């Protein structure tokens, strides 16, 4: 086989794998819409589906690419085209990088859609108008029901300290809703972070700023985590 024929065959093979990648995600589309429609207050099922799809696409298709490459390498060697080896193998690594990046886009979008649905459900089922009263004197307490941790509130009328425990569904919004939306907000640097340290830093800044803005009670803790990440020696190399 000529060098040209061999290379064409290899390009075709990788092209087919790319088509298969799109096909798998396309087939998942409708069932996934239904799953999202039926979500309640958590995204556990989405995590499982995502893991399965990642396996079927990124992992399995890369394995197939490797299998193809072993044959290709053999043929190239037999034909004495040794100068082609690195360049042709590189196409497989480019394919892997492309798949990984595309899957991140898919995944972030999927979790953001799930997050919006969960938020919608919580808002529908939480009584925002409910009046919270002091356990001592029954005066109305100024409670922010969208609190993510227990808060102590001093009653203005009698001075008693009341502990307010937020609804579990609201507490869980931090993990099932706000984190996925932070990821969506920071998608651009997230996609380039593995190749670019500046993008990695930018990703952390955007991601944690979003969390600080939307979970004000934990602002300090998130700020500390952000600072730790940004001061990681990795960035100073
Ligand atoms: Zn009171």
Image (tube, helix red, strand yellow):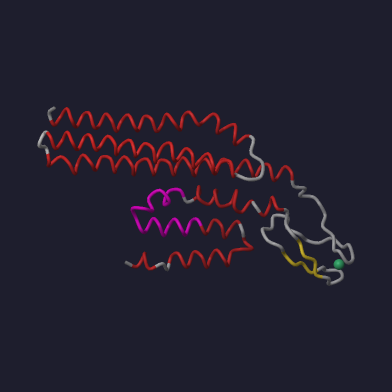
Residue 175: image location, x then y, percent: 59, 52
120 or 10: which is nearer to us?
10
Q: Residue at x 60, y 43 (%)?
A: 116
Q: Is residue 63 magenta?
A: no
Image quadrant in which you'd find residue 59: top left
Residue 186: image location, x then y, percent: 47, 51
Q: Would you place residue 25 above or below residue 134 in this image?
A: above
Q: Which residues are magenta?
A: 187-207
Q: Residue at x 33, y 42 (%)?
A: 96
**The image quadrant in which ligand 1 is located:** bottom right
Q: Is residue 195 magenta?
A: yes
Direction right: furthest residue: 137
Left or right: where 12 falls relative to 153: left
Left or right: where 59 falls relative to 84: right
Q: Would you place residue 175 above or below residue 85 in this image?
A: below
Q: Residue at x 74, y 47 (%)?
A: 126
Q: Would you place residue 1 above or below residue 121 in this image?
A: above
Residue 143: image location, x then y, percent: 76, 59
Direction left: furthest residue: 80
175 or 45: which is nearer to us?
45
Q: Residue at x 74, y 44 (%)?
A: 125
Residue 229: image location, x then y, percent: 45, 64
Total number of numbered discs in the rendering: 0
Name the image quarter holding the N terminus.
top left
Name the image quarter holding the C terminus.
bottom left
| Magenta stretch, main secondary structure class | helix
146 or 232: which is nearer to us?
232
């Amino acid at each position: 086989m000529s060098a040209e024929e061999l290379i064409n065959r290899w390009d075709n093979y990788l092209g087919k794998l790319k088509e298969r990648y799109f096909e798998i995600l396309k087939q998942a589309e409708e069932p996934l819409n239904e799953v999202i429609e039926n979500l309640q207050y958590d995204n556990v099922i989405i995590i499982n589906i995502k893991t399965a799809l990642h396996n079927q696409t990124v992992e399995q298709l890369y394995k197939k690419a490797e299998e193809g490459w072993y044959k290709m390498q053999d043929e190239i060697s037999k034909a004495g085209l040794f100068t082609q080896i690195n360049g042709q193998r590189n196409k497989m690594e480019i394919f892997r990088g492309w798949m990984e990046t595309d899957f991140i886009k898919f995944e972030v979008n999927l979790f953001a859609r799930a997050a919006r649905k969960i938020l919608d459900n919580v808002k529908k089922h939480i009584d925002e108008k409910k009046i919270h009263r002091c356990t001592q004197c029954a005066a109305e307490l100024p409670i922010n029901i969208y609190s993510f941790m227990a808060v102590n509130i001093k009653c203005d009328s009698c001075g008693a300290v009341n502990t307010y425990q937020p609804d579990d569904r609201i507490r869980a919004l931090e993990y099932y809703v706000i984190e996925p939306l932070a990821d969506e907000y920071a998608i651009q640097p997230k996609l380039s972070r593995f190749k670019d340290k500046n993008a990695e830093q930018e990703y952390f800044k955007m991601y944690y700023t979003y969390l600080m803005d939307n979970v004000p009670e934990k602002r300090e803790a998130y700020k500390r985590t952000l600072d730790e990440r940004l001061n990681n020696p990795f960035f100073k190399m």
